[in-house]
Image (cartoon, helix red, strand yellow):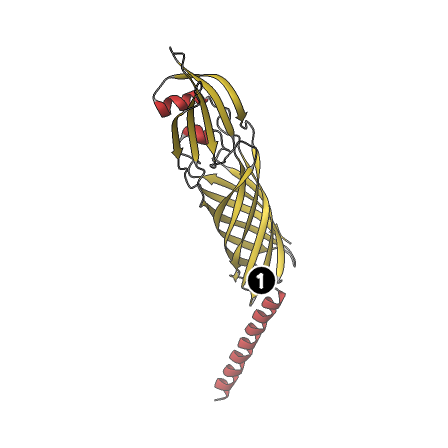
Amino acid sequence: MKKISLLSIILLLSAISINAQDIQLIQQTPKGWFDFQIVQSFGFNDWHRVKFASDRLPNTSSSTDLRLALNLLLIRKTVGIFGDMGVGIMPAPRNGLSDPATQATIATGVLYYTKEKTVEKGSQTASGNFKMTFGIFGKIPVGEKLSVLPYFGTGFTSISAPTCEAILKEHDSNMQYIARYQWFDQDEYGSNSYPLTHLDFRLRFAYHISQKHNFLFGIEYTWYSERINFSETYTNYFNHNIVKTIHHEGNRLNMLGLSLGISF
């Protein structure tokens, strides 16, 4: 009987000790912290099925993101909200100043050459795009030094639209046409940036390295819910009658990324 009582006391003390440790860990968990991260993402597809449209936009083969995030725990220090902002650096377009006559020939079946480019705003270099994301996250301790943090958020990425207008001439003919190409369905040409909304799914691991710092590593998936639509209009150069207008619907871009960072 004494052995059973002694065993009961030991188990009770152990339970109290474990519970006290859990309470201490919860109390030590900060209510809010900042993250600085670098993310390397890789695209699964192009912006558009029309090669001419994709070739003048940033290359989707990869994106290097630098971002700063604020995380706030709200519910029992296990569920919270976050917001981040940063810049995504994408490679230069495959052919930022591609010849519109090639696209006109594909679209109309008539052989053209470019006589003159009257409007041309393309990019031949890597571009930095502003990004912002908001959402919710959870924090799940899996050990004394490791936590798993699933994130779900929505945000936007700003993309600058290329512009192109050219005078095309038919081969072996005096006929000429004004070819106008538009991205994002913009009404007029300009250097405006257009926000593309996206959904983000992130799984992050936080390794505790000091009282206020964690080493972060994880994987994330980004799905762009908006399409970059593209249209081409061909107008008779002499009487300004529209000969043909074609609208193309873009793809929904998908990207998979790996992240590294530190919280403080």
Please, what secondary structure does the residue beneath circle 1 have?
strand
Residue 100 found in image quarter: top left
Depth order, front residue of 71/261: 71
Residue 128 image-quadrant placement: top right
Residue 21 drawn above or below residue 94? below
Q: Identify which residue is drawn at 50% across, 53% down.
A: 153
168 or 99: nearer the viewer: 168
Q: Is residue 104 visible?
A: yes
Q: Is residue 148 visible?
A: no
Can you give x and y, in whole percent of width and height, for residue 146 in the image?
A: 54, 58
The single residue placed furthest to the front in the displayed view is 239
> Does 75 appear above or below 96?
below
Residue 217 spot, x, y in % from top left: 54, 49
**Disc 1: CA contacts within 10 A as few (<14), some (14-19) or many (>=20):** many
The residue beneath circle 1 is 73
Which residue sits at x=52%, y=58%? 137
User: x and y percent of residue 132 in the render?
Assistant: 56, 47
